Amino acid sequence: MDTYTQVWAGSRPGCLIFLLDQSGSMADPFGMAQAGAGRRKCDMVATVLNGFLNELIVANTVAQRDGTTEVRPRAEVAVLGYEGISVEPVLQGGLSGKSFISLPELQMNPLDIERRKRTEIDDTGQEIEITVPFPVWVKAKAGAGTPMCMALEQARDLAQEWASNHPDSYPPVIINVTDGIASDGDPLAVAQEISQIRTNDGQALFFNVHITDFNLSPIVYPANSEELPEDAYARSLFEISSEIPESSRQLLRSLLGKDIQPGARGMIFNGDAASVRQMFIFASVPATQPLNVNE
């Protein structure tokens, strides 16, 4: 029976596979009424993913008795970009050539440390702008077509290998961020193959965020295709997205502050930069459990 209750731990790490659409349309800006307004979609997706990876590292860092800190290896991450006729690992530098990267390896091998400005409130209640270090592992890219099927095939193979090597862990979670239709066929068949991959805790999960430049509200985690517009692509994304496990559905309700119906799918349609971050956080829910030095 699928339970989806295994907490990510050093001895039973979680698995996150990110698929990033890097097609030409990702150079287009978000709509002016959306989070990320006016910014290129590829830039915002890279910023959100870099910020999320840093947050994941911080959340899994514990203090040691000698006063130092240690990043616990509670998750393994793969990032693939797809455009034109190719699918390539995005993580480069010291991480190049590795299928999966642990959190300690990520922490030690950013491609760059940028200086970015952040607004905070000082002791007098005034807004001030401060400069903070921002680790970067993923650079923005926008190229040609959208070989989504090819990307899913590589993600399937990675997830299968990982699940075979970690039979007692929470199953692999694959998050696809895209703004277009696959240019290399129908992704349904390979999505179904992904759903057959499993660990002892459940089947692999495949979630999708469709981002746009429309000034429309996102449709988040629908439980029925009728909640979506009369749009073949919207219905296709719904069909290939995994149903949210019950154990995660309750946590998602708390995260969003709204009811999520039984049978809801891991899908956001007409999303924006905020939607991408929301999906990343939701996908890493098993890593939000209390952390101790033994994990």
Image: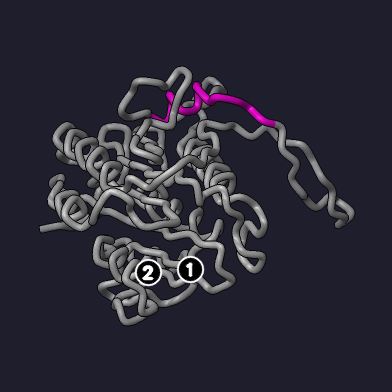
Q: Position of residue 153 (x, y in %)?
A: 22, 42
Asked whether residue 238 is drawn in magenta, I would say no
Residue 57: assigned label: none
Q: Which residue is mark 1?
A: 256
Query: Which amino acid is tagged 2?
Result: Tyr
Q: Position of residue 264 (x, y in %)?
A: 30, 71
Nearer to the camera, 156 or 279: 156
Q: Which residue is mark 2?
A: 221
Q: Residue at x 27, y 75 (%)?
A: 262
Tags 2 and 1 touching, CB below 8 Å = yes
Asked whether residue 111 is drawn in magenta, I would say yes
Determine the secondary structure under disc 1.
helix
Quarter of the image that includes the C terminus: top left
Q: Residue at x 80, y 52 (%)?
A: 121
Q: Quadrant of residue 238?
A: bottom left
Task: Classify 111 as above or below 62.
Answer: above
Quarter of the image that includes the N terminus: bottom left
Q: Residue at x 56, y 63 (%)?
A: 213
Is there any visible trace of residue 202 in the rendered image? no
Compared across the picture, whether 198 is left or right of 256 comes to left
Query: Which amino acid is tagged 1?
Result: Leu
Q: Position of residue 288 (x, y in %)?
A: 42, 49
Q: Which residues are magenta?
A: 102-114
